[in-house]
Image (tube, rainbow, N blue to C red):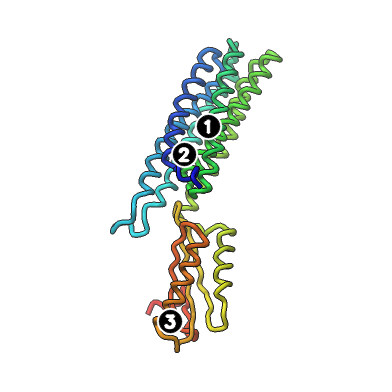
């Protein structure tokens, strides 16, 4: 718990910015001394890491702003823009790598100082891997899609470096210079898939996707605890908005109950739901047992 409070999304994204600068330096140096298009592709992705981390930091800062008159539900969806932007950058980097790899495929060049190049690439991969591991854990604690997106991008960077190292090792063993370009193109196709996946997740968040099945199960368990022949729940809808979660429903109770009694039960249910599910905002509409609400019914528009 203490680690979660210290490792906030903002602090980890600042760390991501610093690590991106360090890895850019290491990978660019590795490319410079080897003239490997594979290492060039690795360095290009680190530039994307830097831009993504900076943009994610901006969006997380906006998402933490309190609700106001213009945004009564808060600014939490700003994180989805970060995830979508990161996906776009990943796709752009992948296309650039494919272009560079295709050019080198038809014009192979001898590689220099492979040993030092591989050492620098491995070192940068270790830094990215450690940071991604910490960010994944913090993203789960804080329910931050921006943090998760940055962590996933770091993981693709690690796999990029692994592919490049393996490819360059194969070049050194076989002398087949074209393998350098093939590895670069293969790595680009892999990160292209990750970029598309991030954009899809971002779009689903912006379209008010329902809560995860395990969270829905928690909500249902709380409602079961309040189950009684005089009380029933229906029209339950949920949605996600960045770190926040929302649930709306109808609660039917006997018409003979006083408003105070009905409101007290509703308050108990809302508090139980919000205690069971961190970051949840519960809204319950009270209805008499013999009254039904029909959504999308033409009569509701009268």
Residue 228 at x, y percent in the picture? 56, 80
Residue 90 visible? yes
Residue found at x 46% / y 76%? 265
Residue 67 at x, y percent in the picture? 33, 56
The residue beneath circle 3 is 261
Judged left or right of residue 3, residue 184 is: right
Q: Which quadrant would residue 160 be assigned to in this image? A: top right
The crowd level at tag 3 (other Cα within 10 Å; few <14, some 14-19, many 20+) is few
Residue found at x 62% / y 25%? 183
Residue found at x 44% / y 29%? 18
The crowd level at tag 1 (other Cα within 10 Å; few <14, some 14-19, many 20+) is many
Q: In the displayed image of the protein, which residue is found farthest to the front?
A: 2
In the image, is residue 205 above or below residue 133? below
Q: Give me the C-alpha separation between circle 2 and circle 3.
A: 50 Å
Q: Are marks 1 and 2 in contact (CB under 8 Å)?
A: no
Q: Earlier in the sequence, mark 2 or mark 3?
A: 2
Residue 212 at x, y percent in the picture? 56, 57
Q: Which quadrant would residue 156 be assigned to in this image? A: top right
Question: Which one is in front, 121 or 100?
Answer: 121
In the image, is residue 75 above or below residue 291? above
Disc 3, SS? helix
The residue beneath circle 1 is 94
Residue found at x 55% / y 71%? 223
Q: Give me the C-alpha separation between circle 1 and circle 2.
A: 12 Å
The residue beneath circle 2 is 86
Q: Is label 2 or label 3 in front?
A: 3
Q: From the image, which quarter does the C terminus lie in?
A: bottom left
């Amino acid at each position: 718990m203490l680690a979660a409070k210290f490792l906030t999304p903002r602090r980890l994204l600042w760390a991501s910015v610093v690590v991106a600068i360090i890895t850019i330096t290491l990978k660019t140096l590795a490319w410079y001394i080897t003239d490997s298009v594979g290492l060039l592709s690795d360095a290009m992705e680190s530039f994307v890491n830097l831009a993504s981390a900076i943009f994610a930091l901006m969006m997380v800062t906006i998402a933490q702003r309190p609700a106001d008159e213009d945004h009564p539900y808060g600014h939490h969806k700003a994180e989805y823009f970060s995830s979508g932007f990161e996906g776009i950058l990943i796709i752009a980097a992948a296309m650039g790598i494919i272009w560079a790899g295709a050019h080198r495929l038809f014009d192979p060049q001898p590689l220099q100082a492979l040993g030092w190049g591989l050492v620098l690439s491995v070192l940068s991969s270790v830094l990215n891997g450690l940071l991604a591991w910490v960010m994944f854990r913090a993203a789960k604690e804080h329910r931050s899609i921006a943090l998760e997106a940055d962590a996933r991008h770091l993981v693709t960077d690690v796999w990029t470096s692994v592919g490049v190292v393996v490819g360059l090792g194969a070049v050194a063993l076989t002398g087949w210079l074209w393998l350098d370009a093939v590895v670069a193109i293969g790595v680009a196709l892999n990160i292209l898939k990750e970029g598309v996946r991030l954009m899809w997740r971002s779009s689903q968040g912006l379209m008010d996707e329902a809560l995860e099945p395990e969270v829905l199960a928690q909500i249902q368990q709380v409602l079961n605890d309040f189950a009684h022949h005089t009380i029933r729940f229906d029209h339950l809808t949920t949605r996600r908005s960045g770190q926040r979660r929302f649930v709306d429903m109808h609660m039917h109770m006997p018409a003979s109950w006083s408003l105070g009694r009905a409101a007290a039960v509703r308050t108990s249910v809302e508090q139980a739901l919000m205690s069971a599910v961190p970051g949840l905002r519960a809204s319950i509409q009270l209805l008499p047992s013999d009254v039904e609400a029909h959504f999308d019914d033409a009569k509701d528009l009268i």
